[in-house]
Image (tube, rainbow, N blue to C red):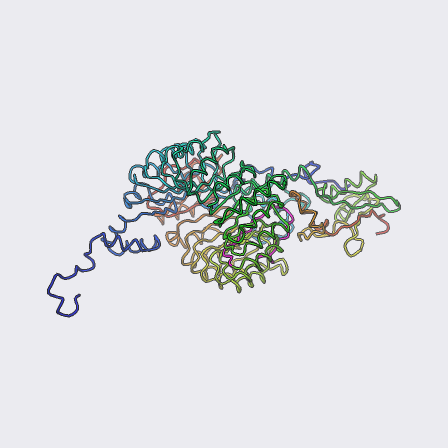
Amino acid sequence: MAECTTGNDRPSPSSSMDSSTHPALSTTSSARRPPARRDLSTDLHLGLSLSTSSSLQAAAESTPSTPRNHALSDWPPIKPFLRSALQKASSVGSARRQRTLFVKVYMEGVPIGRKLDLLLLDGYDSLLVKLCHMFKTSITYADVMECHQQVSGHKAAHVLTYEDQDGDWMMVGDVPWEYVLMYSIDPFAFHFTAYLTYVYCFYRLFLTNVKKLRIARMDKC
Amino acid sequence: MGRGGSRATGAAAPPWHALPDEVWEHAFSFLPTAADRGAAAGACSSWLRAERRSRHHLAVANCYAAAPRDAIERFPAVRAAEVKGKPHFADFGLVPPAWGGAAAPWIAAAADGWPLLEELSFKRMVVTDECLEMIAASFRNFQVLRLVSCDGFSTAGLAAIAAGCRQLRELDLQENEIEDCSIHWLSLFPESFTSLVTLNFSCLDGEVNITVLERLVTRCRNLKTLKLNNAIPLDKLASLLQKAPQLVELGTGKFSADYHPDLFAKLEVAFGGCKSLRKLSGAWDAVPDYLPAFYCVCDGLTSLNLSYATVRGPELIKFISRCKNLQQLWVMDLIEDLGLAVVASSCSKLQELRVFPSDHFGLGVLTERGLVDVSASCPMLESVLYFCRRMTNEALITIAKNRPNFTCFRLCILEPHTPDYITQHPLDAGFSAIVESCKGLRRLSISGLLTDLVFRSIGAHADRLEMLSIAFAGNSDLGLNYILSGCKSLKKLEIRDCPFGDKPLLANAAKLETMRSLWMSSCLLTLGACRQLARKMPHLSVEIMNDPGWSCPLDSLPDESPVEKLYVYRTIAGPRSDTPSYVQIV
């Protein structure tokens, strides 16, 4: 069964800048690391933490679905006053969240759907967990399907699909993480709100394209 | 030297090299820059003597490059001194606390040797309350105190300045960490004190006695610059403006309140009276509805600093579009491409643009488009600092073609290693175009996905480049070698998170003495190379920084030990004696 592997239990988005206090200081392991060309999926995780080389190495070893939530306090190169002003703005923003992205979710064969705010989740895995709870069934998506088929003979009964902007139904999980977003979220929704801070970057391309989710039976795929 | 015989009989004019010092001192007073004066001083010993004795302004770019006493002995007539401490990357948290940069030795030496000192300016240094007390007590003619990005003092120190400096004209506190001791330092300016021209306490986090401030502003009729902190409510701002309509520069501090037509009217009237206002900053938390209160001053504005203003949308754009004479614009990326397009068409006199990120991980609509538009339409644009999320080589090439007059180009793509988002290529071609086209470029910061090739271009073409900042770039030692073996005018080089190792550093050791300083962190340096460098170049101070929690004596470590942070600078003062335990001088 797919599990949330994000490594933190916060149910609501919070400032990814909370965790930074002192600048992360170097460790000696940082000096020897692989050459500069890395695959972009690793770099994307780094986008959140924007780490020094020590976490570059660690990130390279972590699985793609593990986000790094610690933002470093020495990147981007902005002065302390701006950094703390942004931190204040973002922590206020998460306290009174005004951004939502509700999508409809239908289970195949059930005419009445549910609604789900995708921005309350922090990755495909937590999406799956939430949906499994909502619909009381086992659901899977593209990446995990392959993994499950290798690991155990158990096949999930349903697979998660979504309707994208072209109106096509696609299996969730194939959308590459690497290309960061152009959001389908209405820009005016941002107009007078405080900043939504966190960091659903794994999620972002998916969010930009999804309009509806459908849980389809496996044998139909 | 005489011409013709008829004048030869009388007293001949003294040969030029025997002219009295006063003549030379007078001549040198016309030299515009310190570099010119330095060159003149190098010509001969009499010029040296005349120049140094008449030097009134001294800028010490690195407080550890020379000992304070030596500076004072060499230039005994200094009236205005400016000293800088920590390396630039300290601004971004890369230098651990208590590194150094104490102002106290300079102030103590100045108190001894420059009793007539009028101006002091410290940047990125540790200034204590005792320092400020000493300033107030030692210089009877003290007029200007400017502290930029300093820390170590509190409102108690400010109180000493207010009470003791009877001739104070400028108190300019920019982005300092000031401890609030709840001392009403403003009230310590005596009632008879009226000489203030500049008062900037925008970085002070704490309450201010508004009545006292109002009285101060009222009696200082020459006040030209007033920058408030966030403790001044909007209606009080209006009253202050009415008492000081002669202001040229205003920092509004906060600019928010619930919208109320009466308050709006009051603000409008207040700004209407400020016919001389040229520079505006602040507007933190600005409420868009109040922006129109600024409209009457828009025409006259030459500088607008909204770098902490989180206002966005049509009101912001409308406001900026009315500022037709703007030369300097600092704004957050909330202005978006659309806003910058409006800036491009409205602000034809723009010389400097800075766009700051509003949210590290947020979703703004500021792209390379904005910068391309502004650089295409603003012919006088020469300085740019731009934070954005994506860039293309094509955009950079276009920008380079449109604006060969750039002197400062700093681009920060927020995510490290970001390639050209259309072609997925590195941004080498784009930045190469910048350095090839902008022959007068003095400062450059590069970002995005970059290989060694960009450094080849920079090394070969950036002849006037004085400061270069590099982060997350390059493939190999070649990159650093290109820079250090090229870049004829390079003074400051700061590098972080690049795969540069020992070889280029050692191969170009001599270059380092022609530069002011080099910073390298999270690169591939070893202790052995630093030791070799220090041995080879006795006029360089080679500082290594470890984890503050880890104080292993340097001598016990093998040559292969990696060095996380290296700071090298030239100095005539020898190794400094005030290093914390985590800094070791090799």
Q: Quadrant of residue A153?
A: top right
Q: Nearer the viewer, residue A130 or A86?
A: A86
User: Is residue B370 on the magenta stretch?
Assistant: yes
For residue B153, side relative to residue B281 (left or right)? left
Drawn side of residue A70 relative to residue B512, left or right: right
| In the image: residue B242, left or right of residue A181 | left
Question: Residue A17 location in percent, x, y?
Answer: 60, 40
| Residue that sits furthest to the bottom in the current view | B4
Image spot of residue B144 (x, y percent)? 38, 42
Q: Nearer the viewer, residue B296 or B421?
A: B296
- Which residue is situated farthest in the left direction here? B9
Asked if residue B205 is positioned above or below residue B310 in the image, the reply reads above
Q: Which residues are magenta?
A: B349-372
Q: How many marks?
A: 0
The picture places residue B114, in percent across and down from the top left corner, at 30, 40
Magenta region includes residue B182: no
Between A148 and A77, the residue placed more toward the observer is: A77
In this view, the residue farthest toward the top is B182
Q: Quadrant of the N terminus of chain B?
A: bottom left
* Residue B394 vertical position relative to residue B574 in the rendered view, above or below: below
Q: Is residue B481 found left or right of A214 in the rendered image?
A: left
The answer to whether one can see residue A26 in this image is yes
Image spot of residue B510 (x, y percent): 37, 54
Query: Dividing the image into 4 quarters, which one contains the C terminus of chain B?
Result: top left
